[in-house]
Image (cartoon, grey):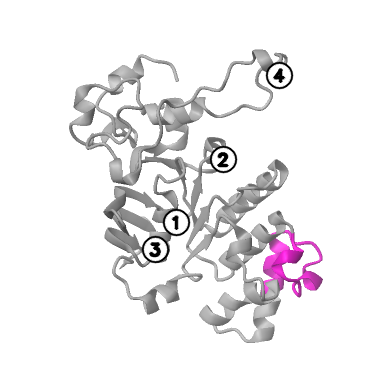
Amino acid sequence: MPLLTVTNLRIALATPHGSVEAVRGIDFSLPAGGTLGLIGESGCGKSLTALALMGLLPENSQVSGSIRLGDEDLVGMDERALCQLRGNRIAMVFQEPMAALNPLHRVGDQVAEPLRIHRGLRRNEARKEALALLERVGIADAARRMGGYPHEFSGGQRQRICIAMALACGPELLIADEPTTALDTEVQAQILALLAELVAERSMALLLISHDLAVVAQHTAQMLVMYGGTVVESGATQEVFARMAHPYTRGLLAARPVLGNHASTRAALRPPLPTIAGSVPSLQSLPPGCPFAGRCAFTIDACHAAPPPALDLGGGHRVRCIRPEAMAGHAP
């Protein structure tokens, strides 16, 4: 049985213009020790999905469907029960570590806090384990720096501290929401390598949320591509990249800058990066059919009629597109 099973997850947000469905019926599962990448542009529903898993959605939201962690359904679970899960069986590394850390508390105390809350350790015992965690995630001179405050650390160090906090109680599921945003490439590689080591070492499941296709390609076994609040393509990561079946997935890859590309060509003569035509529609004005209709070069009238069903391409590779044969005739 999978560790995490999400079925028909829907999230509606109350806005001045009425209720808006921001996540629209997504399904996925993740086994213990598995890695799943979730990619898409800003506003596609990635972070809302993560917050739903943690039970941290804003008050103006309504969630339906099922989120099962083992035998427990988290949808509708009361706050007291969710508090027993957060930081214990399920943990999250947030996108901005400076916002996730309390600026008024020493980092050693913050890493030790979940150990005291969930495992009932005494202060000295919790600090000893917190020290070991900070050393494990690569904080140099950790014994001394435990007494420091978040502003005294670099962005990469703060992210490592957040990872130490998330790992304190040995969670079964770790959610990493853009964990390397705003970090330089060297620190980004170190953080991602650390997450990979910890997944292998602890057999925990990892949900890695990113807009960076290269990160997902290198660090996950399965992937989901989201657009307009729904999953438009999913499957084994290698399979999806080898045979991208949705025009949005192809557009994302084509628009990715490649280091050193056209290096010998003068800047004024370099061709611009390909872009996806049009703009992302607002949640209030999503088309009635395929959410990507109109931006896609393969759009026909039927694309506007109804949301496309998920088509199984074999081997667990699924795509929501009514014209996969048209896509197959064009190179990515």
Q: Nearer the viewer, mark 4 or mark 1?
A: 4
Relative to 88, 320 lies left or right: left
Q: Residue 94 at x, y = what percent?
A: 55, 58
Q: Is residue 122 above or below residue 150?
A: below
Label 2: how many Cα within 10 Å (few below 14, some 14–19, many 20+): some
For badge 1, the amino acid type reads Ala
Q: Quadrant of the C terminus?
A: top left
Looking at the image, is 237 positioned above or below residue 85? above
Q: Earlier in the sequence, mark 2 or mark 1?
A: 1
- Amino acid type assigned to the residue bearing label 4 in the image: Ala
Q: Position of residue 308 (x, y in %)?
A: 23, 34
Nearest the viewer among 88 and 75 is 75
User: Cα distance, mark 3 to mark 1?
Assistant: 24 Å
The image quadrant that residue 184 belongs to is top right
Please state the extent of the stretch shown in magenta in the rendering. Answer: 130-153
Q: Is residue 23 magenta?
A: no
| Pointer 3 or 4: first along the chain | 3
Q: Closer to us: mark 3 or mark 1?
A: 3
Residue 80 in sight here: yes
Q: Where is mark 4, residue-wise?
A: 263
Residue type pointed to by label 2: Val
Three-letter amino acid code at the position of disc 3: Leu
- Label 4 and label 2: CA atoms lie apart by 23 Å
